[in-house]
């Protein structure tokens, strides 16, 4: 049953790929669908899962802190590795971000729901929020600093405050901890919007990878994919194995699964915006997505 549900998610990606291949859609759809998912559907998903969960009991576990610790350590490891490889500073910045930032929201959350039901979806949402906060703060700051655009650095925090995702997190935590009830019609509307996040984004991913080909920077592409899909999940697994109080807990399983998600399309959006090796990132998104098809099946069956 679990394998069939995962296969259903992969079919949505394939549907986007096929739609682009037979020219029902074009490249402009990727930006439109991703913007809808990022600015409307995903904030709705985060807010809905936060207000319908018992955050106090979830935060009694140390899985959130362990994920944060592990991600930060791995970021420094990758940055140090890039310096040893003597990559250009632009490549170092985007390479470091891409090595940890997978498709934790649009693919990771439905995988969490498949594995653990409503609780699994909530845990996956909290972990995805952590990844996104790190990318939207430290990640973008690193890109801004590397690009040396002082005006952007000054406006950095103002740009964060403009993001609907930022406010959905703050308001979701606020309403959840204070247990403030919302009108049923409003909750229903938010829920319906939240349910569109993954299908829309996965369809957009299918359109995106349709035109990705391994034409240049092949070795770096394979190294990036190897670090993201093998080394990073293995590192998270070791940290949780030795530091987490219950290796059979749902949070342990979903933390590993979230770490093994393929590169998010957002990495390409950032690479394109700053002109930091966009071809490398698009190649790695394509390759890691193909790799993830088998890896997710194996990990779900191994961990559950």
Image: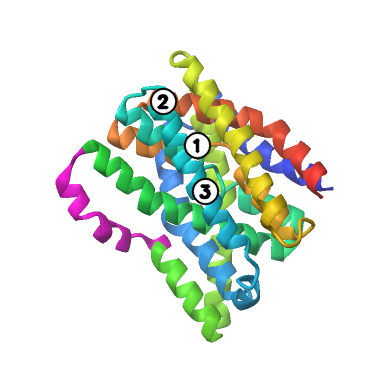
Q: Disc 3 on helix, strand or loop? A: helix
Q: Which residue does the numbered mark 2 point to in the structure image?
A: 84
Chain-order first, disc 1 or disc 2: 2
> Principal SS element in the magenta part?
helix
The answer to whether 277 appears left or right of 57 in the picture is: left
> Would residue 88 be seen by someone viewing this image from the given angle?
yes
The answer to whether 239 appears left or right of 167 in the picture is: right
Chain-order first, disc 3 or disc 1: 3
In magenta segment, residue 160: yes
Label 2 environment density (alpha carbons within 10 Å; few <14, some 14–19, many ≥20)? few
**Chain part drawn in magenta:** 148-165
The answer to whether 23 appears left or right of 230 in the picture is: left
Q: Residue at x 19, y 39 (%)?
A: 148
Q: Disc 1 on helix, strand or loop? A: loop
Label 1 environment density (alpha carbons within 10 Å; few <14, some 14–19, many ≥20)? many
Q: Which residue does the numbered mark 1 point to in the structure image?
A: 99
Q: Residue at x 66, y 60 (%)?
A: 121
Query: Picture coordinates of residue 38 (x, y %)?
Result: 44, 52
Label 3 environment density (alpha carbons within 10 Å; few <14, some 14–19, many ≥20)? many
User: 45 and 148: which one is in front?
Assistant: 148
Q: Disc 2 on helix, strand or loop? A: helix
Instruction: Classify 236 as above or below 207.
Output: below
The answer to whether the residues at label 1 and label 2 have Cβ atoms under 8 Å apart is no
The answer to whether 8 appears left or right of 182 in the picture is: right
Q: Residue at x 69, y 58 (%)?
A: 244
Chain-order first, disc 2 or disc 3: 3
Q: Which residue does the numbered mark 3 point to in the structure image?
A: 71
Q: Which residue occupies the extreme left position in the image?
A: 151
Q: Residue at x 48, y 38 (%)?
A: 77
Depth-wise, is mark 1 or mark 2 nearer the camera?
Answer: 2
């Amino acid at each position: 049953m679990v394998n069939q549900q995962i296969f259903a998610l992969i079919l949505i990606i394939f549907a986007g790929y096929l739609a682009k291949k037979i020219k029902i859609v074009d490249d402009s759809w990727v930006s439109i669908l991703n913007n809808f998912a990022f600015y409307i559907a995903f904030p709705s998903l985060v807010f809905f899962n936060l207000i319908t969960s018992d955050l106090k009991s979830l935060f009694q576990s140390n899985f959130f802190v362990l994920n944060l610790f592990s991600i930060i350590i791995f970021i420094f490891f990758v940055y140090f590795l890039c310096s040893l490889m003597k990559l250009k500073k632009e490549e170092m910045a985007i390479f470091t971000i891409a090595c940890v930032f997978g498709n934790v929201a649009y693919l990771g959350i439905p995988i969490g729901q498949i594995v653990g039901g409503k609780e699994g979806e909530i845990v996956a949402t909290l972990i995805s929020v952590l990844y996104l906060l790190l990318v939207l703060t430290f990640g973008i700051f690193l890109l801004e600093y590397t690009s040396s655009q002082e005006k952007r650095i000054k406006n950095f925090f103002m740009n964060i405050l403009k993001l609907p995702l930022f406010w959905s997190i703050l308001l979701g935590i606020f309403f959840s901890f204070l247990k403030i009830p919302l009108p049923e019609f409003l909750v229903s509307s938010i829920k319906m919007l939240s349910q569109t996040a993954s299908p829309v984004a996965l369809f957009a991913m299918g359109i995106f990878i349709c035109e990705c080909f391994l034409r240049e920077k092949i070795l770096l592409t394979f190294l990036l994919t190897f670090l993201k899909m093998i080394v990073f999940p293995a590192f998270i697994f070791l940290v949780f194995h030795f530091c987490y109080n219950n290796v059979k807990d749902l949070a342990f399983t979903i933390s590993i699964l979230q770490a093994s998600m393929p590169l998010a399309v957002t990495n390409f959006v950032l690479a394109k915006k700053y002109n930091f090796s966009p071809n490398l990132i698009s190649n790695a998104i394509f390759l890691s997505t193909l790799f993830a098809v088998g890896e997710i099946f194996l990990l779900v069956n191994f961990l559950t």
